[in-house]
Image (cartoon, rainbow, N blue to C red):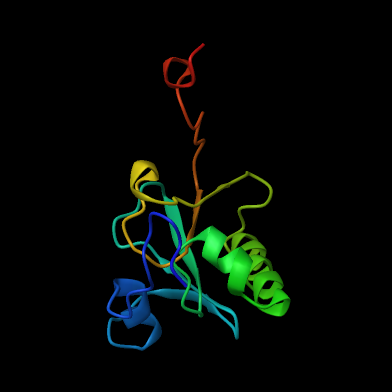
């Protein structure tokens, strides 16, 4: 399904290739709905990606077309991974980038989990107009 500004799903994207086993990854968790693995260029001491197993370009695509069971299973996997990585008590950040302006690099919906240190503000006061 095309999503405005994002086009259609590309079966050749790196996450699709990881899901098919064509590219290795350092798995953290896998279940029927999601695969979680360490980012190859971590931006924090803990930087894990969680991807749904379906062919979704964006959050809008995922929310509009995934079955309810898959949506629930995916978000449960995100929470489970944070628990597995012992990030609950110190805290962590969940981030997803949608589209070019947000810096989405892979056209497959995914969530980043960051932790392992104090992360600070997402945007500086100058960036948010204060």
In this rendered view, identify the residue nearer to me: 15 or 91.
Answer: 15
Instruction: Indicate left or right for 5 with 115 as reference.
Output: left
Q: Report the residue that reaches farthest toward the top.
A: 130
Residue 64, horizontal then vertical, whole percent? 61, 67
Query: Which quadrant would residue 80 be assigned to in this image?
Result: bottom right
Task: Please state the total of marks drawn on the protein image.
Answer: 0
In this rendered view, identify the residue nearer to me: 18 or 129.
Answer: 129
Who's the residue at 30% across and 73% down the image? Answer: 13
Q: Is residue 1 above or below residue 40?
A: below
Residue 21, horizontal then vertical, whole percent? 34, 88
Q: Is residue 58 above or below residue 25?
A: above
Who's the residue at 52% across and 35% down the image? Answer: 118
Who's the residue at 36% across and 53% down the image? Answer: 104
Residue 32, horizontal then vertical, whole percent? 60, 86
Who's the residue at 48% across and 71% down the image? Answer: 56
Residue 58, horizontal then vertical, whole percent? 48, 61
């Amino acid at each position: 399904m095309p999503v405005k500004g994002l086009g259609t799903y590309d079966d050749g994207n790196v996450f699709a290739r990881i899901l098919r086993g064509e590219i290795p990854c350092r798995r953290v968790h896998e279940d029927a709905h999601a695969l979680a693995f360490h980012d190859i260029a971590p931006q924090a001491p803990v930087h894990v990606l969680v991807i749904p197993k379906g062919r979704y370009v964006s959050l809008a695509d995922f929310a509009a077309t995934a079955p309810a069971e898959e949506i629930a299973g995916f978000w449960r996997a995100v929470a489970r991974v944070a628990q597995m990585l012992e990030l609950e008590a110190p805290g962590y950040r969940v981030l997803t980038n949608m589209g070019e302006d947000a810096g989405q690099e892979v056209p497959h919906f995914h969530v980043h989990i960051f932790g392992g240190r104090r992360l600070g503000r997402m945007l500086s006061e100058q960036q948010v107009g204060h």
